[in-house]
Image (cartoon, rainbow, N blue to C red):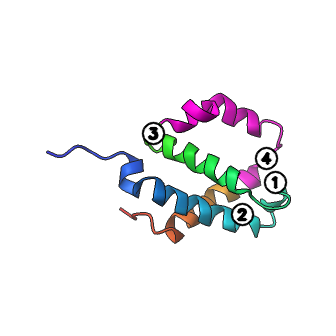
Amino acid sequence: MSEVPTLYEWAGGRAAIERMIGCFYDRVEGDDLLSPLFPGGVSATHREHVTTWWCEVFGGPAEYTERLGGYPAMLAHHLNLKVTADQRFRFAALLSLAADHATLPAH
């Protein structure tokens, strides 16, 4: 019996997560509800940090924790943004669309 892969491995590793995050933020930048959270657009550094976060969340290397402070640091970046319920829902919807657009495995 083979070992069950992590979501990180199943998705295709960092390259796949990076594609997904790129597709996601490309959508965010054009979205009327989420783009105001990123005046001037989403920086390459932000995209890299978020890619590193999702890699870790999906079971990949713990680089976000090791390099960027882990969950407490990520939470601190978002505490004062006053994200609404509608924005949270849109975030999830666009992330799902981005996974499809980035051709992550469907099953």
Dot 4 amino acid type: Val
Q: Which residue is denoted by mark 4 in the rendering?
A: 83
Magenta residues (range): 62-89
Residue 66 point in image, percent of width and height: 55, 31
Q: Which residue is denoted by mark 1 in the rendering?
A: 37
Q: Are marks 1 and 2 in contact (CB under 8 Å)?
A: yes
Task: Decide which of 39, 35 is in the foreground and name it.
Answer: 39
Circle 3: element type: loop
Cα–Cα span, label 3 and label 2: 26 Å
Q: Residue at x 50, y 46 (%)?
A: 55
Q: Earlier in the sequence, mark 4 or mark 2?
A: 2
Cα–Cα span, label 4 and label 2: 14 Å
Q: Earlier in the sequence, mark 3 or mark 2?
A: 2
Q: Are marks 4 and 1 in contact (CB under 8 Å)?
A: yes
User: Of helix, strand and loop, which mostly describes the magenta segment?
Assistant: helix
Mark 3, other Cα within 10 Å: few <14 / some 14–19 / many ≥20: some
Residue 81 point in image, percent of width and height: 82, 43
Q: Nearer the viewer, mark 3 or mark 2?
A: 3
Q: Earlier in the sequence, mark 3 or mark 1?
A: 1
Residue 94 point in image, percent of width and height: 63, 63
Circle 2: element type: helix
Q: Which mark is residue 28?
A: 2
Dot 2 amino acid type: Val
Q: Horizontal placement of 58 versus 83: left or right?
A: left
